[in-house]
Image (spheres, rainbow, N blue to C red):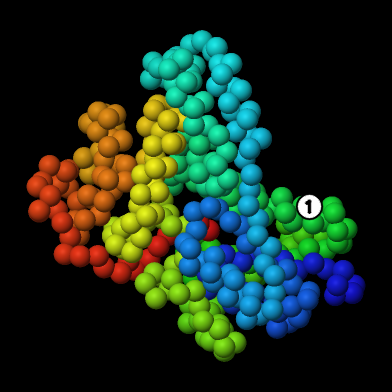
Amino acid sequence: MMKNETLHIVGLSGGKDSTATLLIAIDRLGKENVRAVFADTGNENPETYAYLEYLEQVLGISVVRLKPDFSEEITKKRLFIARDRRRGRDKRGDKIRWSNKAKRRALAVLQPTGNPFLDLCLLKGRFPTNRARFCTEWLKRDTFVEYVDSVIQQEGRPVVVVWQGIRRDESDKRKNAKKIERMARGYYNFRPIVDWTVEDVFRCIASHGLEPNPLYATLGRVGCAPCIYATKGDVRLLAASSPARIERVRDWEHLVGQASKKGFAAFFQGKELAGTKPGEVSNLVFWERHQIDGILHWAAKEGRFFAGDWEEDEENTESSGPRCGSEMGLCE
């Protein structure tokens, strides 16, 4: 089979692993035979967008940017809400249909914004959690797979190889990752750095005369800003370095809450915080403590946070100052 009959796609996130994978692919195949693809969630660090432009300039390539559009799904959701006449109650005894008040509230804000992450959360009426991690599924995996499928159909390539920057030592979930995996007829995932260490990755980038994403100067990993898995250190660092993004989270919580049947939404809803256990506190207290201002209060205290810490005076809960977060959660 001729080399150009096979399409080689590199999933590029702007992180160190995908960057090293892209460099290996170009070394082996030539940049004209490699296609770098970036799935834009709409919740990325601005530095990552700049880094992609840097790679384009230095490597002489053009990165394909994918941006999911949920306009059609939002239109269907609006129609469903407006026409909802269901009867009955859920297991908690609440009516399953949307009340007229909730309908008016949701329909007033349920419009496409052009930001994939926000639009998806408006559609869902909530933010993702560790138990419902729909952000990775809808914004990255499905978007990427749809692109690959469209390439296969439109370009008629007999074989598509997707290069992935996955390493076995990243997590227990990936410790058994295969170097090459057949996903479907003519569709393969290839992971050239699967047995590499972090040091190997940075060494590869440096050997090509490139700089890694500048976010690594303060963060251990590069991903969404913020990520639902953000640690206390991550939240403190974000608040100190980018107050505008904290304000954006506050705005998003309001909009998504309006689009929710409950009337509330919290970006960090999935965090298990002391003094917020359902059944022990009211719904109002639960949402207040999980929304961004409550999370800032939680993050301000270094060390273990106790239920009584919610009641302490502000002067006792202030941190000694923002510190570099050692790690920012990254959507896999």
State the residue at coordinates (76%, 80%). 30
**Residue nearest the viewer, comparing 47 with 132:** 47
How far from the left and from the top, in percent, is residue 3?
Answer: 85, 75
> Relative to residue 72, is residue 35 depicted above or below?
below
Mark count = 1
How far from the left and from the top, in percent, is residue 159?
Answer: 83, 63
**Residue nearest the viewer, comparing 56 with 290:** 56
**Residue nearest the viewer, comparing 73 with 243:** 243
**Residue 270 in view (yes/no):** no
* Crowd class of label 1 (few under 14; some 14 to 19; many from 20; radius 10 Å): few
Q: Amino acid at mark 1?
A: Ser
**Residue 312 in view (yes/no):** yes
Quarter-of-image position of residue 252: top left
State the residue at coordinates (9%, 47%). 313
Q: Is residue 311 left or right of residue 233?
A: left
> Relative to residue 237, is residue 136 depicted above or below?
above
Q: Secondary structure at mark 1?
A: helix
Residue underneath mark 1 = 150
How far from the left and from the top, in percent, is residue 27?
Answer: 70, 83
Quarter-of-image position of residue 178: bottom right
How far from the left and from the top, in percent, is residue 128?
Answer: 46, 43
Quarter-of-image position of residue 53: bottom right
Q: Is residue 322 left or right of residue 63?
A: left
Q: Is residue 234 left or right of residue 59?
A: left
State the residue at coordinates (22%, 49%). 297
**Residue nearest the viewer, comparing 50 with 64:** 50
Q: Quadrant of the N terminus?
A: bottom right
